[in-house]
Image (cartoon, rainbow, N blue to C red):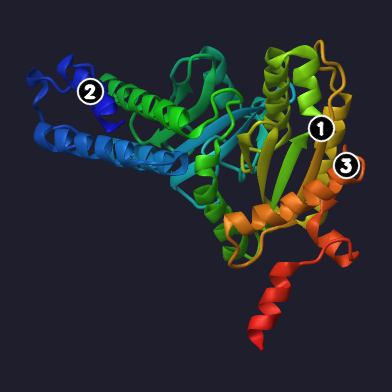
Amino acid sequence: MKYRVITIICAYIENEKLGLCREHCRVSHFGSAGNQMDGLLDSVGDLTDARDKDSLEQSLAAAMFDLLGAARLVLWRLSRQNDAVVLRRRVSLGGSGGESAAHDSGDAAPRSKLDSWPELHACYAARANLRWPAGANGLCRHAFPILDSREPIGILEILRPDALTEEQERLVLGLLRVYRNHLGLLDDTDCDELSGLLNRRTYDETFRKVSTRAFGDDTAGGGFIAVIDIDHFKRINDAFGHPYGDEVIVLLSRLMSAHFQDTHYLFRFGGEEFVVLLDGMTSAEARATLERLRATVESFPFPQVGSVTVSLGFSEIRPGDTGAAAFGRADQALYFSKRNGRNQLFSYEELVAACELVDHTRAADEVELF
């Protein structure tokens, strides 16, 4: 994986697209050309060492911030929610802790519509990097779209006392290409080919992150795991053929991706089974979110197949939980749903409280105490 990305950056350097040719061996903001090259190669090394998207975003932002001498830098992620493009601030470096780079007067919402951010929306619409002169804060602003094959997936926003030079802009564009290519390699490794969702291989590490956040911040809210299963999926394949079954999986994956926030994690575990990790929610919020998904799927007109429903089970993530234990609880709630009529949502904890299920995990813990 790393060799392919290193080849990309070496090609950039060889073709002088980063402005590092011998004729430009002069002292600049970065220091000597040798120091600049060392800093650049260190940054590329950090990017290609990243093994997940969170680490990759952190490495990209830190590299840009240091190489460009930015006063403030924000890396935004873009996604679609229904018909709107929404953004979320993923990494923010420099400046006041509560200050927004694009709206100096207030903090950004965790997830807000792109239309409410004029400068970022202009960058998104232009599909090109834009710059603005220094404002009241004395800082020039640059915005660079992060593009995949279809549309922008993010925006890099840079504020500094002086506008970027052409050489520095080429540096940004070159590192963004390395970032996009490495992101694509991570997607190839971590994502299910048919649905585009995360695959089972990534589940344990992602579960650990969600669990750590759920119990590392009293204000973050809890974490939940839900298991989702397409009802009578074998009948769909038998009646319409596997291509239509695949289409149901693709369309359902898109519905779920649009429904859940980008702070939540969606997995296809294989066949017709999906898993979602919900981050920063109360039990009531998790239930309401999952129930809305169930109703959305039930009312969606799937081409040729018509009506499709899903059964769901969910459980709260506990201190010291493992991914397997949490999945097992949610899976029990799912199968209670399927045994009792399908197209329903059940909570493991609520079923235990109603004596419909026995919490063997807690029973074992109580035995160990004595």
Residue 359 position, x and y percent, is 76, 67
Between the C-alphas of marks 3 and 2, the distance is: 51 Å
Q: Is residue 126 left or right of residue 238?
A: left
Residue at (49% x, 50% y) in the render: 205
In what element is the residue under mark 1? loop
Amino acid type of disc 3? Gln
**Rounded to the nearest whole Å, what is the CA distance between mark 3 and mark 1?**
10 Å
Q: Quadrant of residue 306?
A: top right
Q: Work out whether residue 130 can be spotted.
A: yes
Q: Which is more toward the observer, 194 or 220?
A: 194
Evaluate if marks 2 and 1 touch, with contact meaning CB atoms under 8 Å apart. no
Asked whether residue 29 is in view, the answer is no
On the image, which quarter does residue 139 sit in? top left
> Which residue is most to the top?
304
Q: Is residue 213 above or below residue 237?
A: below
Q: Nearer the viewer, residue 257 or 171?
A: 257
Residue visible at 41% across and 44% down in the picture: 55
Q: Earlier in the sequence, mark 3 or mark 2?
A: 2
- Measured in 3D between alpha carbons, the distance from the residue under mark 2 to the one under mark 1, in whole angstroms, is 47 Å
**Residue matched to label 1:** 231
Quarter that holds the C terminus = bottom right
Q: Where in the figure is residue 19, as x and y percent of width and height?
A: 19, 20
On the image, numbered disc 3 is attached to which residue? 344
* x, y percent for residue 242: 69, 16
Camera-side mark, 3 or 2: 3
Q: What residue is drawn where x is 31% and y is 36%?
A: 48
